[in-house]
């Protein structure tokens, strides 16, 4: 019988989540794919995405995925993504726009059924404990069981949220997942594009907040570590002040249309004292000030990770003992 990993052309049931804005670039994606997992390049501006895919191809001959966030993906993104082996989409209404293998990340049974109906080759069921933007409202294992039950035994389901070691991966496979998708664990790798000071905060971090504070241009829940901005603006309401969320909702159509490059330049000017917070995270090329003025995305599992390691080693260790 051909397994899901065989069909993808990968050896290990581990997928590195796409993390946009330069967090998962070609170095990270290629290291994971070269080790036998599936590495994913996160969304950046279309020309940069094209270059990232080419750079990854120079580092590995193995399959590479690209992640597109539907609220921000333009025609040129889809054209660039056509050069990848797999396209993973997230957020918004799933629709097939690629001849390649296509996965859609979902937060509910309804969304998974919608993605399957739209022709997705697989769904990723994302639990509420996940880092970054969070679609799920239930723990990942519970959602996996529900989605698996709803789509039937033959349709591929992957599981995202809270996976940091091989016991976690095995538990997801035993519950019916074809593979596990890991964001936070690979964020804490040598090859991730996170700013060194962001990686230090991840190493120290043991609690996360599900908030809507960093919602300019994308008013959606996201899980982050506390920093100066969350301490200044969240108070008793972890989602953020009602007036700020109303501002995000009202201005989203305008800000979401700004090119991704301009959005990151605006992020560089963010200041923890001024409530104009967009979703761009601190990458190595951003000013260190963004570590306290921008989102420090992290999943709940950050509390269980105490090192920053080479991504290839992580992919192999995550898969230890899997069939
Ligand atoms: C730093 C960071 C950035 C993320 N960016 C994206 C993104 O651009 N697109 C996407 O589909 N998911 C993104 N996610 C969510 C992941 O796809 C995945 O659901 C999540 O990382 C799984 O939970 P975990 O962090 O506990 O492993 C991001 C996650 C993190 C931690």
Image (cartoon, rainbow, N blue to C red):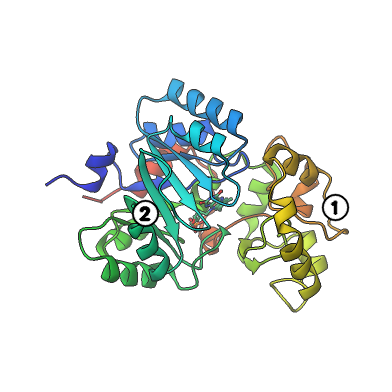
Query: On the image, which quarter does residue 46 sit in?
Result: top right
Name the residue tied to disc 1: 271
- Measured as percent of width and height from the top left, residue 258 is found at 72, 44
Q: In front: 101, or 238?
A: 101
Residue appearing at x 37%, y 49% in the figure: 318
Q: In front: 118, or 304?
A: 118
Query: On the image, which quarter does residue 191 sit in?
Result: top right
Q: Is residue 9 left or right of residue 215?
A: left
- Measured as percent of width and height from the top left, residue 269 is found at 84, 45
Q: Kindly tell me whether mark 2's CB lies below 8 Å from ligand 1.
A: no
- Measured as percent of width and height from the top left, residue 107 is found at 46, 65
Contact, CB < 8 Å: mark 2 with mark 1?
no
Name the residue tied to disc 2: 180
Given the current orientation, which residue lies at the most extreme bottom position?
236
> How many C-alpha atoms fall within 10 Å of the one at disc 1: few (<14), some, or many (≥20)?
some
- Measured as percent of width and height from the top left, residue 222 is found at 61, 62
Q: Earlier in the sequence, mark 2 or mark 1?
A: 2
């Amino acid at each position: 019988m051909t397994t899901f990993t065989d069909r993808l052309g990968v050896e290990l049931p581990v997928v590195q989540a796409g993390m946009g804005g330069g967090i998962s670039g070609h170095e990270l994606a290629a290291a994971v794919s070269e080790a036998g997992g599936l590495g994913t390049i996160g969304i950046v501006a279309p020309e940069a995405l094209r270059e990232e895919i080419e750079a990854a191809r120079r580092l590995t001959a193995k399959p590479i995925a690209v992640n597109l966030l539907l609220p921000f993906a333009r025609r040129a993104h889809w054209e660039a993504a056509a050069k990848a082996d797999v396209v993973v989409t997230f957020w918004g209404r799933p629709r097939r726009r690629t001849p390649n293998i296509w996965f859609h990340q979902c937060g509910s049974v309804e969304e998974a059924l919608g993605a399957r109906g739209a022709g997705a080759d697989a769904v990723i069921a994302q639990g509420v404990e996940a880092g970054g933007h969070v679609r799920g409202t239930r723990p990942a294992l519970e959602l996996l069981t529900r989605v698996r039950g709803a789509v039937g035994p033959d349709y591929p389901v992957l599981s995202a949220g809270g996976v940091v070691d091989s016991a976690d991966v095995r538990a997801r496979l035993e519950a019916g997942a074809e593979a596990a998708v890991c964001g936070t664990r690979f964020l804490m790798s040598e090859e991730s594009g996170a700013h060194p000071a962001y990686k230090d905060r991840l190493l120290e971090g043991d609690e996360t907040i599900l908030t809507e504070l960093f919602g300019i241009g994308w008013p959606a829940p996201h899980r982050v570590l506390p920093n100066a901005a969350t301490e200044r603006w969240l108070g008793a309401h972890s989602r953020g002040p009602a007036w700020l969320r109303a501002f995000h909702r009202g201005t989203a159509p305008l800000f979401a249309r700004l090119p991704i490059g301009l959005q990151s330049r605006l992020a560089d000017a963010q200041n923890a004292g001024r409530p104009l917070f967009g979703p761009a995270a601190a990458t190595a090329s951003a000013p260190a000030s963004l570590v306290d003025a921008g989102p420090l995305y992290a999943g709940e599992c950050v509390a269980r990770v105490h090192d920053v390691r080479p991504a290839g080693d992580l992919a192999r260790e995550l898969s230890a003992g899997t069939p």
